[in-house]
């Protein structure tokens, strides 16, 4: 770990203090299901609100900052209070499906409100990891109905071990957004998936969600969480990830598989998914292949989302070339859990970007673009992004653990 552990810790402590000082700019208080919640908007630009409340952003921020109990509990309460209860083709709503965007934003003749297939798995994972990290198992009873509904949702989407996303379930032919996991702006080689689609990263999140549901089921009253063999289903889902979502020619996980076939590319999703998988899910050869294949994603500021030279690559593309600070924390923690220290160390380069630019939504960096005195890197998107603010605390927890 270049710079030494103590030096890195000191830099992160300074960044964490700065993040905590400005996070209140995103704070909002609202009432959901009769509960007063303190939440945080996803981002602001030049002092103005830019993004509102997003289920995914709140949960990922909570996952990265599990020791911030008030933040975690209110993020979970928000998702619990906004889970889908019916089938709606306009919004993408399904029973137990987590909210994407609290505001009703229209695109392509539909609403983005429930355009997220990953929020329900993240809800289960966050609840289980929070309870394990804090021993606050009593809190789970407060959101038990929502946890049960989210588990039902995940089980409904896992068919034969694969998590399948399909707007037909809610009565639609497509969603307002072109993809319904965190990289929701554009998929390589697709305008829209040829549904049903399985996203590799969401498959890994579903594996973690099934395991989380099994853990939660032991802490809640009998019948709260459905009790099929959840651990067995998680194991099968982990195996299907390697059997169906790994390209043998590239020796690397694909981005997704739909009716048109596999979306084969070197993407940060392969690194990101390590955060949700257990060490036994991947053997040494697979881990080495991921680390080797991801070398083309490495930059001086962490891993970019998509590799140079591939179809649709652009170093200034939102999800097909940019560098996202929050993802570096996810990658660093996941890589460390699987013993990939070289991957962890590349992800830790985000510290330099945060020190230079602050808590931007994303960074742009182009090979060969140099400025006198250093490498040219730009902060783009929101200049204050919620899950970027979560990075220092997440990395402090990692560095503190060795």
Image: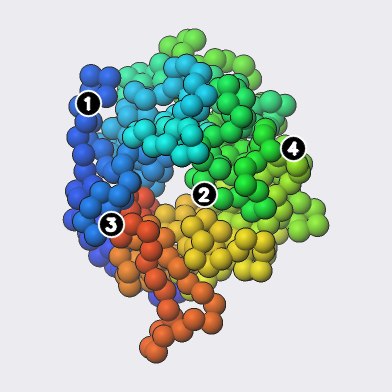
> Mark 2–mark 4 contact, CB under 8 Å?
no
Give the label on residue 185, or none. 2
Q: State the residue at coordinates (32%, 69%).
A: 357
Q: State the residue at coordinates (19%, 48%).
A: 24
Mark 4 vs mark 1, CA separation in Å = 42 Å
340 or 357: nearer the viewer: 357
Q: Mark 3 or 1 closer to N-term?
A: 1
Say what secondary structure mark 1 lies in: strand
Q: Would residue 338 be found to the left or right of residue 300 on screen?
A: right
Residue located beneath label 3 in the image: 45
Q: Would residue 60 be found to the left or right of residue 151 on screen?
A: left
Mark 2 vs mark 4, CA separation in Å = 20 Å
Give the label on residue 259, or none. 4
Q: In this view, does 259 lie above or below 350?
A: above
Q: Mark 2 or 4 closer to N-term?
A: 2
Quarter assignment of residue 83: top left
Mark 1 crowdedness (10 Å alpha carbons): few <14, some 14-19, many ≥20: few
Q: Mark 1 or 2 closer to N-term?
A: 1
Give the label on residue 93, or none. none
Residue located beneath label 1 in the image: 31
Say what secondary structure mark 4 lies in: loop
Q: Mark 3 or 2 closer to N-term?
A: 3
Mark 4 vs mark 3, CA separation in Å = 39 Å
């Amino acid at each position: 770990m270049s710079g030494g552990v103590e030096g890195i810790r000191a830099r992160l402590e300074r960044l964490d203090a700065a993040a905590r000082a400005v996070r209140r700019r995103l704070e909002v208080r609202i009432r959901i299901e009769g509960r007063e919640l303190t939440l945080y908007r996803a981002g602001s630009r030049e002092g103005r609100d830019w993004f509102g409340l997003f289920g995914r952003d709140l949960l990922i921020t909570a996952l990265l900052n599990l020791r911030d109990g008030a933040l975690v509990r209110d993020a979970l309460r928000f998702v619990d209070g906004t889970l889908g209860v019916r089938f709606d083709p306009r919004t993408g709503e399904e029973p137990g499906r987590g909210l994407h965007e609290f505001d009703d934003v229209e695109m392509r003749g539909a609403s983005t409100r429930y355009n997220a297939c990953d929020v329900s798995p993240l809800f289960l994972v966050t609840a289980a990891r929070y309870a394990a990290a804090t021993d606050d198992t009593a809190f789970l009873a407060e959101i038990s109905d929502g946890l049960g509904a989210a588990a039902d949702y995940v089980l409904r989407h896992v068919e034969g071990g694969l998590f399948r996303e399909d707007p037909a379930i809610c009565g639609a032919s497509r969603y307002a957004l072109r993809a319904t996991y965190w990289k929701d702006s554009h998929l390589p080689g697709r305008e829209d998936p040829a549904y049903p689609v399985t996203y590799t990263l969401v498959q890994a999140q579903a594996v973690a969600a099934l395991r989380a549901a099994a853990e939660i089921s032991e802490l809640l009253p009998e019948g709260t969480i459905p009790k099929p063999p959840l651990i067995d289903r998680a194991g099968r889902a982990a195996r299907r990830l390697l059997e169906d979502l790994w390209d043998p020619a590239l020796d690397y996980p694909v981005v997704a598989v739909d009716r048109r076939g596999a979306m084969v590319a070197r993407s940060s999703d392969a690194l990101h998914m390590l955060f949700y998988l257990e060490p036994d899910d991947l053997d040494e050869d697979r881990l080495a292949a991921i680390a080797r294949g991801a070398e083309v994603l490495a930059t001086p500021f962490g891993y970019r989302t998509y590799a140079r030279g591939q179809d649709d690559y652009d170093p200034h593309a939102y999800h097909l070339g940019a560098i996202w600070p929050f993802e570096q924390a996810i990658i660093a923690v996941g890589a460390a859990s699987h013993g990939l220290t070289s991957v962890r160390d590349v992800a830790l380069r985000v510290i330099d970007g945060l020190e230079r630019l602050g808590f931007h939504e994303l960074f742009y960096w182009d090979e060969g673009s140099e400025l006198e005195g250093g490498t040219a890197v730009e902060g783009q998107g929101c200049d204050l992004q919620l899950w970027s603010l979560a990075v220092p605390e997440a990395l402090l927890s990692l560095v503190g653990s060795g």
